[in-house]
Structures are given as C-alpha cells and as structure tokens.
Amino acid sequence: MIDILTILLLALPVGVVGALTGLGGGSILIPILVAFGVPVKYAIAASMVSIIATSSGSGASSLREGITNVKAGMYLAVYTVIGAVVGATASNYLDPRILYFAFAAFLLTSFLGLRQHLREEVPAQRPQEGLAAWLELEGRYHDRSMKKDVEYKMHRPLLAGAGMFVAGIAAGLLGIGAGAFKVSIQESVLRMPAKVSSTTSNFIIGMTALAGASVYFSSGLLYVSLAAPMAVGSALGAVLGGRVINRLPNRGLKAMFLVVVAYLIVQMLYKGFTA
Amino acid sequence: LTGTHREIPEAEIGYVLIAGLTVSVAVILIGILGYAVQSGGSSIEYTAGWQMTGPDFFAYLWNLLVSLSLSQSPVATMSLGVVLLMLTSYVRVLATAVVFAFSKSAKYTLISLLVFLLLTLTLVTH
C-alpha cells in the first residue's frame, strides 16, 4: 500500500511539469495514485489541493520575474470561477460521457491549432482591437532564454472569456483543473507567448481549484492523508519549475505541452468510453 | 524591465505566495514528522479522523482551530497546513486587488474584488 512519503515523492515531478506547462497536474497525478490503489474519488478531491499548491509554487517565482500577466489572469478568472461554480452545480444533471467526448474534441482542435505555431518563439505582433486595448491586455517581460525583452499584445478577449467559462465548467464538472483548456485558449485566442500562458494559467488555476476544493469539504471526500503530501510535493516541484521556466525556450515548452495534451486526449476518450 | 521588485508591482503578490507557501509547507511537514514519530510509519488511512469535512471551508477552519487548541495532534497539524495553503490562494486575490488599488487601476481593482467576492461566495455556500 502507498504511504505518505511515496505520495510526496510522486507529486514532486508532477509539480515541475505543472509549473512548466501551466497544467495543474491533476490529470497526471490522479491515474498514478489510482494505479497505486488510491480510490479515484479521493484522488480527485486531493488533487484539487495539489493544484492550489502548484499554482502558488509556480506563482511565487514567475510573479517576481514579471512573466505572469496578472491583468489577463484576473480578467479571465472572472469567467473561469463562474464557470467552475456552474459546472459543480450542473454535475448532478449532466452525463459526464458527453463532456469527456466534447472536451477530447476541443483538445484535439487545440492540439492541431497549437501545432501550427510550434516553430513560433513569440507570436507575431498585430494591432489590438478596441476591447483588448481598453482592458490593457498587453505585457512585457525579460526572456532569459532569448536574452531580450519580449513585448506582446493580446486579442479577442470576449472569445477568450467565453472559452474560459467553458474551461471553468469542465473543471467544476469533471473535477479537474482544466489547465490544458486554459493554456490552449490563451495561446490560440489571446495569442500569449508560451511562458506567459503557462504562468498565467497557473495563476488562474489556483483560484478555480480553490472553488472546486471547497465543494469537497461538504462531500467528505477530502482526506488529509493524501492532500498533505501531495501539497508539499507539488509545491516544491512547482517552485523548482517556476525558477527554471524563464531559462527554457518557448518552443520547448509548447512541445512539452503538446505531448501532455496528446496524453489528455487519449485519457478523455478512454474515460468517455468507459464511464 | 529586468525583473526587479521596484519595476514590477505584481511582484508583491509573489511575496504573499512565498510567505503563505513557506508557512503552510512547514506546518504540513511538522505534522507529517509528528505522525511518523507517533505511529512509527507513514501509512495512508481513510478513516474519519483523517477526513477534512465540514459544512463549508470557514466552518471547517474554525472547528480545526478549536480542536488544535484542545490537542495538537499531528493529523490536525497537517490539516492546518493544507487549510493555510488554501487560504494563501484566497488571500492573494485580495492582495492583487490591493496592488491594483495602489497602482491606481480602478478597472482591475474592481475586477479583482469581483473575483474575491465570487470565491468568498463559493467558500461560504459549499
């Protein structure tokens, strides 16, 4: 039987990957825990705490480096938190199988879209439309791998908001952080650079996961025996990931993200067929 | 832009996260070590004593503080660490609103306060 120390050690590399890709890491950690005999519902509930730890650990480093776009993060958080509450409330009325297929299709579309931009280190600049300019959705950070300051402007904030609302619903309904959806929307719709997208997704995902975790307090599925070591391992791993992300090329991060998304598509389809 | 504290106001939020994370991870580790010493191992249990449950987040936090004042059990210490971690995520939204208020960005102060309100409602009603 798995023990506390083993869970802590398993969560550590997941925290690193979570910080680098902008995913909470729940989708990676849950199947591993289940393989070790942890009941799936307990693993999902504890993974919410793990996502919060990844978000805080990653943010601790990336916020100080100015990579995270806090304005975009807060704007998008409005949609995703409302979506998470709607999703958690609607989970009693919707068939999760339909959702698994719908989100597998969405991830596949994102995968194909993002693959087209794989060679692009930073999105090409183009003039901003009115709302994006009014919301001040732009930024600048010093890229250590490129050894220069990178400026970027974001686009289509309403479409991105709608996408984030859906991502929030996915998080609330399926008990996931939905980081893959958030990163895809931020890169494909808003046209954020990969590093900004990963760190901003991690900034948002902590808030969505907090809303999700609160639901588990009343359900009695949250066990500290799982949540505590997962939190420590994920937090330490995410701090490490947050410290190295600015030294890695955007293209490398995109490639890593696409590998994880491919894995998630298979996972969603499998769950859809077996749910 | 070189990533220094003075040039990035949002860096203040990073310091809130570091403080919250350091305290919560330290408290969890004290709990884990206490449990290992007390039980002679670190096996996982799914019994009522390990459950983090209550009518809502704040009610659970209150009950936890009361139980910790009565007996400093390692499991309750671990639970306190997890709750502190969650509180860090909650407080940083408020910290974000404060940072935007000091930056004189009324738009994003209001947006941050809206997110804080939504999270508070979620934590109170679930």
Image (spheres, rainbow, N blue to C red):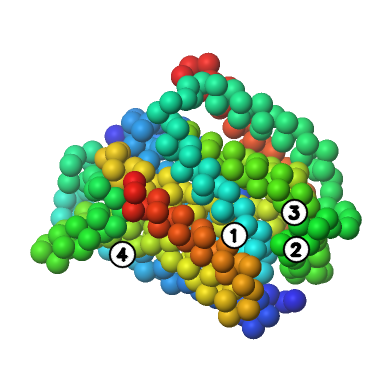
Mark 2 element type = helix
Mark 4 element type = helix
Instruction: Name the residue that disc number 1 marks.
Output: A74
Q: Give how far across and how far down residue A105 sits, in percent.
A: 66, 26
Q: Give how far across and how far down residue B68 sits, in percent.
A: 17, 63
Mark 1 element type = helix
Give A96 or A249, whichever is nearer the viewer: A96
Query: Crowdedness of circle 3 by 10 Å Cα count: few (<14), some, many (20+)?
Result: many
Q: Are marks 4 and 3 on the same chain?
A: no
**Identity of the residue drawn at 62% across and 45% down:** A164
Q: Amino acid at mark 3?
A: Met
Q: CA distance from mark 3 to mark 1?
A: 15 Å
**In screen coordinates, is A237 left or right of B34?**
right
Q: Are marks 2 and 1 on the same chain?
A: yes
Instruction: Name the residue that disc number 4 marks.
Output: B27
Q: Chain of mark 2?
A: A
Q: Nearer the viewer, mark 3 or mark 1?
A: 1
**Identity of the residue drawn at 59% across and 23% down:** A101
Instruction: Name the residue that disc number 3 marks.
Output: A192
Mark sitting earlier along the chain (2/1): 1
Q: Chain of mark 3?
A: A
Q: Decide: marks 2, 1 in contact (CB < 8 A)?
A: no
Query: Crowdedness of circle 1 by 10 Å Cα count: few (<14), some, many (20+)?
Result: many
